[in-house]
Amino acid sequence: MHPRALVERALEKNLDMIAISDHNASANVRYVMAAAAGKNIQIIPAMEITTSEEVHLLALFGSLPDLLKLQSVIDQHLFGENDETRFGVQAIVNELGEVEGLNNQLLIGATDLSIDDTVAMIHQLGGLAIPAHIDRESFSVLSQLGFIDDHAHFDALEISKLTGIRQGRLQYQELDRYPFVTSSDAHFIRDIGSSTTKILMAEPGFTELGMAFSAQDGRRILEESC
């Protein structure tokens, strides 16, 4: 999953835009953006945060500096060191495939930030907050909390590729006020592009994505095509 291979695979799968969302980490994002420079694909700087409730929450941003501001806060609320024998090496790899360093934080762990506080922080930094794979039996907002509060300020909800958006709409009819998205949630290179969301936008990009989530000026998620 080094940056160049990741970008090449995304281009092979004819993807226009991808989010790079490592667990509680962002050091590799800049290198994926560098690998994609000049190519016909947009990279959304992102992170998949584990909240204190052990909910996986996606944070998407319009710029790398905004993501790095979030990272500085996450670093203060994530504890423990990685055990390479159990969880593997957490390498930081540049666009040339060279190892820049290792991240020794326990990235598989949970922060001590609540989901409400994390969503508020994401929005304060200008980002979009999306609970990940809400249909899964672990690490989802529904598995951990049992419900989504009527006053939750999520921008969209992600349905895993195992369920898909169409089935998700049938399964979660009470959540019809939210836009749904789906993704490959790729942890291996072969999985990139295995599930996608089609979106009507003027062009691929963060601002247009936010407009599609709120159905502004004709932008929208094309759920019937997903």
Image (spheres, rainbow, N blue to C red):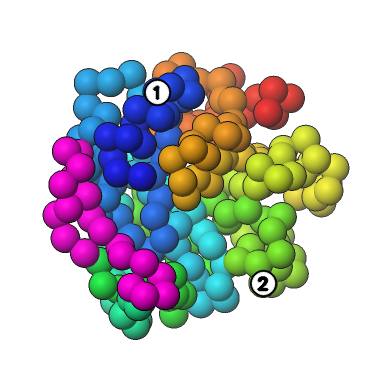
Q: Split into 4 quadrants, where in the image is the C terminus?
A: top right
10 Å neighbourhood of mark 1: few (<14), some, or many (≥20)?
some
Image location (x, y in percent) of residue 88? 36, 67
Mark linked to residue 61: none
Q: Magenta stretch containing residue 31, yes or no?
A: no
Is 220 placed above or below 152 here?
above
Q: Amino acid at mark 1?
A: Leu
Is 51 placed above or below 153 here?
below
Q: Nearer the viewer, residue 59 or 184?
A: 184
- Span of residues in magenta: 84-102
Q: Which residue is mark 1?
A: 11
Residue at left offset 34%, top offset 82%: 80
Horizontally, residue 43 falls left or right of residue 12, namely: left
Is 11 placed above or below 165 here?
above
Q: Quadrant of residue 42?
A: top left
Q: Is residue 95 visible?
A: yes
Image location (x, y in percent) of residue 75? 29, 72
Residue at left offset 83%, top offset 48%: 171
Image location (x, y in percent) of residue 101? 16, 60
Q: Split into 4 quadrants, where in the image is the N terminus?
A: top left
Q: Amino acid at mark 2?
A: Gln
Mark linked to residue 144: 2
Residue at the bottom extreme of this rendering = 80
Image location (x, y in percent) of residue 214? 58, 36
Q: Is residue 127 visible?
A: no
Is 98 placed above or below 36 here?
below
